[in-house]
Image: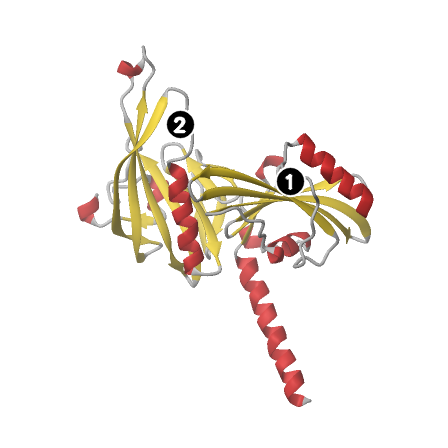
Amino acid sequence: MKTYFYLLFLLSLSLVAQTKDAQKRLYYNPMEGDPAYAMGKYKLKLQGFEETFDTLTTKQNMVDFAKKNHFLDTIPKQNPKLKIPHYYLTYYKKNGENHWQNTMIYFLGMKMDGKDVSLIATISSVSEAPSEEIDTEMLQLVLDRKVPKENYMGGRSFDFLGRKVPLMDECYWTGVNIVRCPTKGEMNWSLHPTLAEAQQAIALQKRWAMMIPAPENHTMSLLMERDITLLFEGKETRATEIIYNEHYQHPILKSHHKDYKLIVYYIATEVRGQAIACAISYYDYNERLADTGLPEFVSQFVRLPKSSR
């Protein structure tokens, strides 16, 4: 009997540790009234739904939703891993070879603050093949309002794995954990349970870069790709450096526009005990600091060997 309770105690400790680890990877950003969450490879948006959660009514609402949004999947299903009342629909989009965008629409019924509430959770991910997998722990943490305060993004500074990073005046948020500074660089990142998952995430992002539709009258081409060693958060790290060429091809105005080069560092590593996938980029026309050879925002995270400047 003592052994049984001891094993239960160890199991409870393990579950608490897993939950705390997941919380560290969960980010929230209010995004100017369109709040969103991110954890690992998953993005999540939550919105209220006025009708009461009821099996027949909810299923019919979901069929109507699927038809209105041109979903091929119109049959509500249930996820055996999720304990709260729910149904979900799937939507897949093929971006390219071995690159799929997955979208899961969950209709949820639950109690919040003592009231019956109906919610719609939109959960998206990218994978090599169509997948209806979600992170149920992420969804439960969001519903339980357990995002750590230090992982609230969207302000004029943010916590980057325990280090406070200020944003310069021109910088702004374009996603849960995406910062863009027009003349000083850009960065996006995600935290993962394992280094292998971080490596897979950055490989998929690198593949996506050549699939993104170019702006009108522009073309993007890959000029150079190489593996380099750089300092990321003060740690010597292997990264992939890719240089893309952006060409303006308007039949009349192209002679007035020069080509620009976009330099991107794709990084998957461990920082302060946390697996991270990170892409940092800037244009060749961005002003660079004399002591780093990099734009100011990029310099807050990366240092290059002198031979690479």
Q: In the picture, which quadrant includes the C terminus?
A: top left
Residue 155 in view, yes or no: no
Q: Residue at x 49, y 60 (%)?
A: 193
Q: In the picture, which quadrant includes the N terminus?
A: bottom right
Residue 221 appears left or right of 175: left
- Mark 2: secondary structure: loop
What type is the residue that disc 1 sits on? Asp
Q: Residue at x 70, y 43 (%)?
A: 75
Measured from the top left, where is residue 257 in percent x and y?
29, 19
- Earlier along the polypeptide chain: callout 2 or callout 1? 1
Q: What is the quadrant of residue 6 in the picture? A: bottom right
Pointer 2: what residue? 214
Q: Residue at x 70, y 35 (%)?
A: 65
Q: Nearer the viewer, mark 2 or mark 1?
A: 1
Pointer 1: what residue? 73
**Image coloring type:** secondary structure
What type is the residue that disc 2 sits on? Ala
Measured from the top left, where is residue 96 in percent x and y?
43, 38
Residue 101 appears left or right of 114: left
Question: Mark 2 and mark 1: span between their CA atoms?
Answer: 30 Å
Q: Is residue 81 above or below residue 186?
A: below
Task: Decide which of 53, 272 is in the foreground and name it.
Answer: 53
